[in-house]
Image (tube, rainbow, N blue to C red):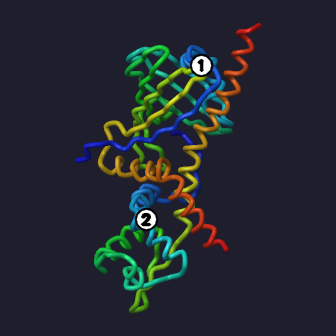
Amino acid sequence: MMTELPVYVLERAFNAPRALVWRTWTEPDLLAKWYGPGVETVIHELDVQPGGQWLNEMRMGESSGYQKSVYTEVVPPERLIMLMSTTNADWELAPNPMMPDWPATLLTVVTFEETDGVTQMRLEWSPHNASPAQIACFAGAVENLGKGWGAGMEMLAQILADMQA
Amino acid sequence: MNIDLATPSAPNLDAIFAALADPTRREILTRLAGGEATVNEIASPFEMSQPAISKHLKVLERAGLVTRAVDQQRRPAKLNAKPMRDAVDWLEAFREFWLGSFDQLDGLLDQLKHEEKD
């Protein structure tokens, strides 16, 4: 039994007031404009309140990827907490075919802090209702994505370069 | 995440991530990047018993990161880089999805700020 779940964190500062950044997460036309690089994002539903959901389709050529997020906490303009899941086209939970042991649902915490007109946005992901195998898989990824990313990935890149040399 | 990385033969990324999560196993991989080695040779720089190293090698083998010759008594272990490439690519894709989204958000916020001024 793991007492502490692995968490993956990404942070980014935006040169904009917090209220504006908040709008980009909570207004469908704005959210569709930035979420998903190089894909066409179609928002089927966006109801930002506890229990409400965000139904998101990402079109990549012929195929589409689907995600459902259910909001558990909404504190404008400070914090959004949601359960993000990979789904099929009917919005039913479906494991990622490439990653059967990847947690189907990630608890996602987004926080916004403003200092002098600059907003620091922080995203945290952790497995939700995950099996030990899923938690282990996520922990392994975080090890490499997170603090171990730099050293670990540089090492792996070196190994790969050596292999190809 | 929905990241389109479909390939004809899906590697076992879960096993790869689990295998890579351990620092000793990553060191073993570094050692093997320098060339194939026996359990003895791998174990020497570690303060670890041969059985412990064998256990780590089994995890790496299951992940497809390492192959071991079956027809030799020494059974040297050899690095198999392809699955590692797949794992690295997947991790990169996840991160890049969000960093790419953040870049787009940056541009959008600039645009919104100008609109508010007008």
The answer to whether residue A28 is visible is no
* Real-space CA distance between mark 2 and mark 1, rounded to the nearest whole angstrom: 49 Å
Q: How many marks?
A: 2
A128 is higher (above) or lower (below) than A19? below
On the image, the x and y values in percent for residue A73 come to: 39, 19
Q: Residue at x 47, y 56 (%)?
A: B13
A161 is higher (above) or lower (below) than B42? above
Which of discs 2 and 1 lies nearer the camera? The answer is 1
How crowded is the residue under tag 1: few (<14 C-alpha within 10 Å), some, or many (20+)? Answer: few
The image quarter in which residue A71 lies: top left
On the image, the x and y values in percent for residue A77 come to: 49, 15
Residue toward you, A22 or A44: A22
On the image, the x and y values in percent for residue A64 come to: 59, 36
Secondary structure at numbered mark 2? loop
How crowded is the residue under tag 2: few (<14 C-alpha within 10 Å), some, or many (20+)? Answer: many
Residue toward you, A101 or B101: B101
Q: Amino acid at mark 1?
A: Asp
| Mark 1 chain | A
Residue toward you, B116 or A67: B116
| Mark 2 chain | B
Secondary structure at numbered mark 1? loop
Disc marking residue B27? none
Residue toward you, A85 or A31: A31
Residue, far top: B118
A126 is higher (above) or lower (below) than B7? above
Q: Amino acid at mark 2?
A: Ala
Left or right of residue A63: residue A146: left
Q: Residue at x 54, y 27 (%)?
A: A120
Q: Residue at x 62, y 72 (%)?
A: A162
Residue, far front: A116
Mark 1 highlights which residue?
Answer: A116
Mark 2 highlights which residue?
Answer: B63
